[in-house]
Amino acid sequence: MHASLLATAVALALSAAAPTLLAADAQPWMNKARTSTQRTELLLQAMTQEEKLLLVFGYASGDQLAQVDASVIPGVNAKEVITKVIPGSAGYIPGIPRLGLPAQFQADASIGVRNPYLERTSLPSSLATAASWDSRVTEAGGRMIGLEARLSGFNIMLAGGVNLAREAQNGRNFEYTGEDPLLAAEMGAGLIRGVQANHIISTVKHYLINAQETGRNIVSAQISEPALRMSDALAFELAIEKSSPGSVMCSYNRINDVYACQNDKWQNQVLKRDWGYKGYVMSDWGAVHSTVQDANGGLDQQSGFPFDKVAHFGKPLKEAIDDGSVPQARLDDMVRRILWAMFDKGVVDHPLGDAKTAGAIANAIDYAAHAKISQQAAEQSLVLLKNEAGVLPLSPDAMPKRVAIIGSYADKAVLAGGGSAVVTPIGGNAVPGLGPGGWLTQVWQPSSPMKALQKLLPATQFAFDAGTDVAAASKAAAAADVAIVFVHQWTAESLDAPSLSLDGNQDAVVSAVAKANPNAVVVVESGGAILMPWAKDVKAILAAFYPGANGGEAIARLLTGAVNPSGRLPLTFPASTDQLVRPQIGGKSEGPLFTVRYTEGAAVGYKWFDLHGHKPLYAFGHGLSYTSFELGGLAASQAKGQVTVKFSVKNSGNREGASVGQVYVSAPQSAKWEAPRRLVGFDKLALKPGQTGTSAVTIDPRLLATFDEATGEWVIAPGSYEVQLGAGSDDIRATAKLSLTGRRFTSAQLRR
Ligand code: BGC
């Protein structure tokens, strides 16, 4: 008898006799007392070949799917699948009801549930919350968006971008968590933990490099293995250890000539073997290029068909297994990994409501509370870059009579980044009709900084000027006691920023305002670093990135001192583009395959600036507060090969505030590090005026090592190292010596 018929017959017989037996005996994998690994093996044994093939093949939603040949996957009718997919969602993999295995409903992305038909709460951009330097902030955000995902009918969230900001112009830097592997991993891991706390799977993405959007499907990132292990790959390695994401998404690009999703080296040898990763690799949407190479190269699930024009994992995978070019054991391994993630993250044991009733369930979402979570994230994250002559905070005690608000629709909205990560705001797009249109329509969150300021400064008169005309802006500024100019740079997936300069006449507007008013303040809404030719002419600058659903309220509370700024830059703001490794992004969007050589290796961001002695406009780790901190008591010690750094921080000013103590280490020449120093630890402390707090950070040994390609080991060179304690990478307050003995170890040994 056919295995599935046999199973059905057994199930029917048992259910008639003793319903409780059904779960315990007929479906032993449903026994929660067993481990995820045991349950996985039991279920795998019960599956037919067709069911296995079903599980490794994902569909996109809507219009794309409607055009699909109905029989790409044996035993499944794509036309039926369409009726199950949540419209506007990222993807869908059918369930297997006879085995109690739920369908997988996939939703983008890292700042909230992305769907053109569903209005949901948006966090600030991931780069913004990385600026909190506090994984409690990203974790709280992850919990909130993961709950919205679950209540909206999704059990897989494509959240968790940790690609390093290797290129200042990368259009997706806003989706990632900065330029340093440790910071990126900590912040990304917080988000993933939060999302998965809702018994849903989160991905970490996009594995690996994917440092530019220009030609992302045709570029090959050329980089040495040690450099990659010590930079982008390290961010993934640490993020995976700190959050155990159910899934890893492989990226569009090639890595040293081999497509990421068929890359045996980085998927099989590094991710799965060296790092011991137990979850599954899903492809990015349209990133699969073959059946045999991708399957054998370590891809476990093809996503979002028909983004790939060919159903590589449908019938062709079955045929490849039949003719032996893909081993049966490989298909079993793909399925095993997907099942393990579904058990381990709680997807099987915590079923979603019926997707059809998702709309009704979504009414249960407390949007007001969630907007506050987003606002708090922004308040912990936005970075005060400059504040001269105490122009900020605009306090109610010394209330300015007249404030001019200029530019960037600040009378009604704040900006969001574009592409698959953009969330449809509650209440809709506040400034419709901008941007290239379609999936790249510019989205503005309906949260007005001006209205929020008006509430906080009730006796002040506010006037708004659109900031489109230099003379008008200058006139508005001249008529006020304080002029706040909002500038913006919109970036999006699939497009790199054409330059780091602001669009249109925004620079000219700021310069004119600064001339017209001695109290000029600039609020920057951007995807990442921008150039600020006017920085020296204005009194204060707040980096707001894309500040999320209540960004306007957060900006107002920071400007008025209702909240003391505590964000620190997660990436370097260059003084000019010639300080960058590559002043322009290489390659073309379409055409022949091309290569970008990452000759800087692991010297990304501030490491590159240190190496070349470039003085940035604003350094990595920089950020001001309305209070002041004394950092000291630095001591580094070693026990059982573990290095711990202790320090103390005193709030020496007269306002409550939070400091981020940053620990950097520089190595002796003989260690041959990629750059003079690395961030090895940090700790954010909230302190009352006069209060002193202490921190102890343990240093991951990989952050003190280089990678030896010949042996696959990390190597710590013996010698005298310097530990630096800073309030920013350019603001070192204390140093201490650290003497290390030589040591070699593998990533696997660290897990034991
Ligand atoms: C993006 C992914 C996203 C996927 C599904 C791709 O274009 O690169 O980040 O998760 O689409 O929407």
Image (cartoon, rainbow, N blue to C red):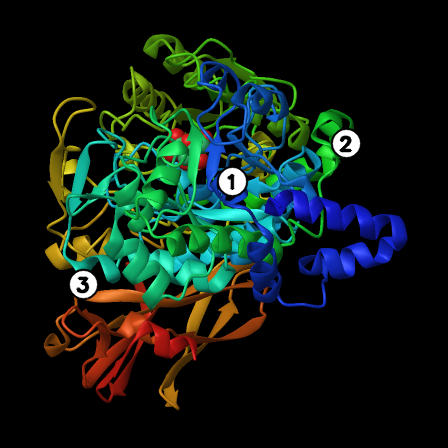
- Image height check: is 131 above or below 442? below
- On the image, numbered disc 2 is attached to which residue? 361
- Image height check: is 302 above or below 613? above
User: Is 79 in front, or is 184?
Assistant: 79
Q: Which dot, 1 or 2, sits closer to the camera?
A: 1
- State the SS at label 3: helix
- How packed mark 3 is, by other alpha carbons closer than 10 Å (few <14, some 14-19, many 20 or more), is some
Q: Quadrant of the C terminus?
A: bottom left
What x and y, as percent, mark residue 493? 36, 29
Q: CA distance from mark 3 to mark 2?
A: 48 Å
Ligand 1 falls in quadrant:
top left
Q: Residue at x 25, y 61 (%)?
A: 229
676 displayed left or right of 480: left
- On the image, numbered disc 1 is attached to which residue? 50
Q: Is residue 542 visible?
A: no
Q: CA distance from mark 1 to mark 2?
A: 33 Å
- How packed mark 2 is, by other alpha carbons closer than 10 Å (few <14, some 14-19, many 20 or more), is some
Mark 3: which amino acid?
A: Pro
What x and y, as percent, mark residue 418? 42, 26
Residue 73 - label: none
The first of marks 3 and 1 along the sequence is 1
Q: Residue at x 38, y 84 (%)?
A: 642
The first of marks 3 and 2 along the sequence is 3
Task: Answer yes or no: disc 1 within 8 Å of ligand 1.
Answer: no
- On the image, numbered disc 3 is attached to which residue? 226
